[in-house]
Image: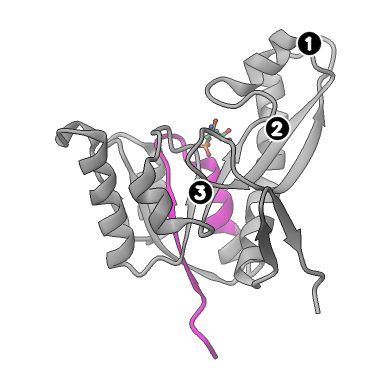
């Protein structure tokens, strides 16, 4: 049996998407090895989630580095050291530059709380409400040089309801994020994703 795909996760905060991935692995719905959780902040709850599930957890504190590039190089070195084959950005709130993208092109996924290309960047749910859209949702995509711009793997739509607040809409979108992120990682792990320019083709299950 080949060794399961080695996955590393980057998270800056709460870590609920990371936890959804971990729970999918523990429940046997996702056959990968959670090799490492990296946070850029020492107080990130995601670090505690990793420790609670006995996953290697590392804080690469951005404040300890003189520049964005040197911090990013340290993150890449940690991922390489654990032989990470796929990186999942899960609420990682730092812009990732060319060094990281070149190293993990086609092997790094990101999750974003909108139907991209609408509402990239911060506060996507607030942007959607302020724009008055009737449908928003969640997107898993490959990372590229832009902010929330790479080829789209999976999306889930969420209706915007009258009276929605940022909190109520965010929580319904989050439930979809927790569903589609493990699914996208599973498709990657099964070798069923092919990137073709902006498009991601998903091969049927054999
Ligand atoms: C999630 O909603 C994720 O989609 C979003 O941050 C949140 C992190 O929550 N990411 C972005 O906005 C990326 N542009 P979590 O820490 O509980 O997974």
Question: In the figure, is residue 30 to the left or right of 43?
Answer: right
Q: Dot 1 corresponds to which residue?
A: 132
Question: In the figure, is residue 72 to the left or right of 157?
Answer: left
Q: Secondary structure at mark 1?
A: loop
- Respond yes or no on whether mark 3 lies under 8 Å from ligand 1: yes
Q: Quadrant of the N terminus?
A: bottom right
Which span is picked out in magenta?
A: 1-23
Q: CA distance from mark 2 to mark 1?
A: 16 Å
Q: Residues within 10 Å of mark 3 (few under 14, many from 20)?
A: many
- Cβ–Cβ below 8 Å for labels 3 and 2? no
Q: CA distance from mark 3 to mark 1?
A: 30 Å
Residue 62 in view, yes or no: yes
Ligand 1 is found in the corner quadrant, namely top right
Q: Dot 3 corresponds to which residue?
A: 18
Q: CA distance from mark 3 to mark 2?
A: 15 Å
Q: Residues within 10 Å of mark 1 (few under 14, many from 20)?
A: few
Q: Secondary structure at mark 2?
A: helix
Residue at the image position 31 percent from the left and 64 percent from the top: 80
Question: In the figure, is residue 159 to the left or right of 32?
Answer: right
Which mark is first along the chain, 2 or 3? 3
Residue at the image position 52 percent from the left and 22 percent from the top: 122
Residue 104 position in % (x across, y down): 44, 57
Q: Is residue 80 magenta?
A: no
Residue 97 position in % (x across, y down): 37, 41
Camera-side mark, 3 or 1 = 1
Marker disc for residue 173: 2
- Respond yes or no on whether mark 2 lies under 8 Å from ligand 1: yes
């Amino acid at each position: 049996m080949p060794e399961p795909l080695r996955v590393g996760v980057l998270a800056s905060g709460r870590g609920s998407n990371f936890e959804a991935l971990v729970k999918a692995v523990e429940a046997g719905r996702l056959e990968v090895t959670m090799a490492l959780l990296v946070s850029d902040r020492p107080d990130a709850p995601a670090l505690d989630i990793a420790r609670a599930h006995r996953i290697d957890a590392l804080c690469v504190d951005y404040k300890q580095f003189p520049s964005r590039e040197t911090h990013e190089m340290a993150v890449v070195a940690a991922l390489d050291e654990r032989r990470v084959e796929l990186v999942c950005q899960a609420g990682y709130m730092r812009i990732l530059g060319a060094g990281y993208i070149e190293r993990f092109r086609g092997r790094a996924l990101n999750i974003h709380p909108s139907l991209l290309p609408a509402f990239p960047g911060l506060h996507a749910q607030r942007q959607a409400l302020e724009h008055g859209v009737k449908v928003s949702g969640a997107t898993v995509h490959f990372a590229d040089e832009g902010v929330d711009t790479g080829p789209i793997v999976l999306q889930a739509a969420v209706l915007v309801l009258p009276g929605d607040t940022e909190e109520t809409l965010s929580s319904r979108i989050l439930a979809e994020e927790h569903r589609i992120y493990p699914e996208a990682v599973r498709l990657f792990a099964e070798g069923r994703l092919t990137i073709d320019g902006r498009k991601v083709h998903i091969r049927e299950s054999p």
